[in-house]
Every structure is written in C-alpha cells, then in structure tokens.
Image (cartoon, helix red, strand yellow):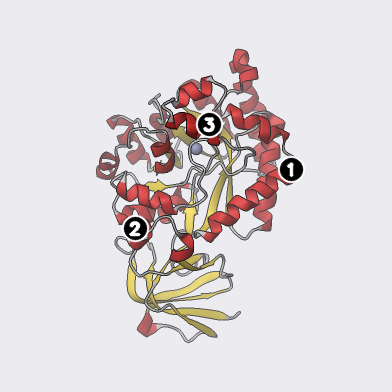
Amino acid sequence: MSELVIHNARVMTCDPARPGLGMIDHGAIAIAGGAVRWVGDDADRPRGDSTLDAGGRLVTPGLVDCHTHAIFAGDRANELAMRAAGRSYLEIAAAGGGIAATLGPTRAATDGELAALLEERLAAALAAGTTTIEVKSGYDLTVAGELRLLRVVAAAARRGPQRIVPTLLAHLIPKERAGDRARYVTELCEELVPAVAREALATSVDVYCDEGAFTLDESRAILGAARRVELAVRGHVGQFRDLGGAHLLAELGARSADHVEQIDDAGIAALARAGVVAVMLPGACVQLRLPVPPVEKLRRAGVAMAVASDLNPGSSYCETLLPQLWLATTHYGMTVEEAWLGVTRHAARALGLAGPGTLVAGAPADLVLWRCDDPAAVPYRYGVAAQLIERVHVAGAR
Ligand SMILES: [Zn+2]
C-alpha cells in the first residue's frame, strides 16, 4: 500500500476536535489505501513512498454538496427570463412552468439519456471540488418512475468516482393526481417508500413541505412511513411559507431542514434541540428573490448550518459550490468559517456521513489542493474553478 505525503501545506482539517476550521498552517497529510493515514505538523510528517510539495497552499476536505436535484432532463431558461421580467415562482407554476415543466422531458428521457445528463453534471461538480454529492429523485412523481430515477442514480454511484448519496424526494402532487391527493400520499407511503427501502435505493426520504407542495399532515405521513422502514428523513421547509415543518423535522429526528427562509423562533429552537442541520440554499434564494434565512438567529441558537447548490433546472442550475460559498458569505452574512463548515463537515452530517468533509486519520482521502493559501480566497474568486483548483482526489485517487 503506497503512501503519498502532501507537505508544505496549509491544511484545513475541519476536525471537530480542533477549534474552527482546524487549520494547520505548516501542515502535512499522508494518504494510503484511499484513506487519510496521518495529518499534523509538517515537521513531524512520515516519510511516505512519494511526496507532493503543496507550496504553502491550502488543502481542504473534498467538498460535500448535500442538496441537489441533479437527475432531470430539459431546461427552463425561459423561466429565468420570466422572473427577470417580474413574474413570481407561483405565477410561473400556474402558467405551466415550475417543477411540472421538468416532468415531461424527464419521463420521456431514456435511462441512457438521464445517465448521460447526470454524468455531465457530476463531472462539472467534481471539477469544482465536490467529491461527495447528494442526488434526489423527484422529477417523475409516479411510483415506477421515481424508482427508475433512483436506479439510474445507483448505477452512477457504482461507476464513481464521487460518493453519491441518493435521496427519495416527495416533491409535490402531480397535476393528474390533484383530485386524488389522499390516495397519492397513501401510494407514496405504502408502495414507493417501502420499495425504495427494499431495494436500498436511497438512504433518506425528503419531503417538500410548503405552499404548492405537501401539507404538514401529508409530510408527517410520508416521513412517518420512511421512519417505519428505517430510512432517515429530511425536509424542504419554509422556502415560501412556514407550515411548521421545522417542528415536524425536529420531532422526527431529521438529518436536515433545508431552505428555512421562513422559520419562527420556536422552529429554530426545535432544530437546535434536536440537532437538525439547517441547509442554506442561497443560489435558489437569490434567483427567486426570497428573503434571506435568519442566519444570525440560527447561529445564536447553535444550529449547525450547511450550504448546498440546490442544483435543479428551475431555480438553481448550478453544479458547483463555489458561487454558493460566495453568496453564503456576502448575501447570507455567514462567516468564512461557517461557509466552509457548511460545504464540508456540516454538509456531511446532513447526509449522515462521518468522515467525508474532514481530513482526520481514518477519513476517506477526499481532498482538494487549491491555488491559494487563504480560505477566504475561495468565496472571493467564486466563479473560476479552473483558476482556483490545482487537483482533486477522491479516495486517494486523482
Ligand atoms: Zn431542493
């Protein structure tokens, strides 16, 4: 097992045992067999079979994107144009746009077409440092179709190289089932969720609990079904209206509450008590011109915050976390440290992963060598992955 030692590096460990970002200013890291074997001061580094001089530059954990809708066909650039001309998300949905506009192309695409589109997006994410990525289903909305999407995701996960975390998303009620809501929800609970668990096609179930999507009671039923088959739960809550989703997620021990533009103080306290990660999705927030989530209140309550791309064809067609780091620090008022933890350790926690998102002995050797030495330089030069990134390793392999 040959060992590579990266030395003369500014190592951001994100080690929970160290304060802040766990920076080691004159650091080194030894990797072998796909894992981190050692990390510490350069002066104490092991010899290794090969070495790489980082030139004093930054080495961080590979980025973790904990919220994407990366499997879909078609595009909705016209909606950006409509929004730019002043129409709202709900008006665009009423005019046949929104999520419904992605259903047709996605349902019509072959498995091979969907796989090719997904791979292209995964490659773009990897080139921008994302080594672990969550992918949600949710653009078919039939039992068979959602299972198909998750099988395409599973095949991509087997091919690698990234770590892919699949999630079943209960996105909304399709138009053809609008008169039949209760039966549709029962179908999700009694057919889709158990089938996903049986085939091990996802590790968690996410529900969109908001105006225009699922009610609080429907969300409770769907997430309850997930808990019964031992799947983790998450939720899109409070993007447009606070329906009380944060309380439901806290009560169910959810991994994350995502969006939370609208959340009251009691909801924040509930997330804090239950240790639920709040996932910030600034790209979608800006594009939809929504108010910024209450970051200062979340911080004061001690809620861990993650930052994700929300890659989706409607409100955030963006494969990379770099613009999200920029928006998190500029538009959301997160500190550089909070933003970095949001795309590393806290994002991994939202996915139920320990190891990815940190550089500590035993963690997978997923890392990025940057062309800068200052963590603030990454959100600062947010648009230019190629200029910022020297190399990316997943499980030790470049
Ligand atoms: Zn989303």
Residue at 61 percent across and 23 percent down: it is: 174
Residue 149 image point, x, y percent = 67, 40
Position of residue 169 relative to residue 201, above or below, is above
At 41% from the left and 31% from the top, the residue drawn is 239
Q: Is residue 160 left or right of residue 214?
A: right
Q: Residues within 10 Å of mark 3 (few under 14, many from 20)?
A: many
Q: Which mark is residue 380?
A: 2
Closest to the observer: 274 or 283?
A: 283
The numbered mark, 2 or 3, whose residue comes first in the sequence reads 3
Which class describes the residues within 10 Å of circle 1: few (<14), some (14-19), or many (20+)?
A: some
Residue 280 shows in the view: no
Above or below residue 4? Residue 173 is: above
Q: Name the residue carrying label 1.
A: 111
Amino acid type, label 1: Asp
Asked if labels 3 and 1 touch by Cβ distance under 8 angstroms, the answer is: no
Give the residue at mark 3.
Answer: 223
In the rendering, at what x and y percent does residue 371 appear? Answer: 42, 70
Depicted 26 relative to depicted 255: above or below: below
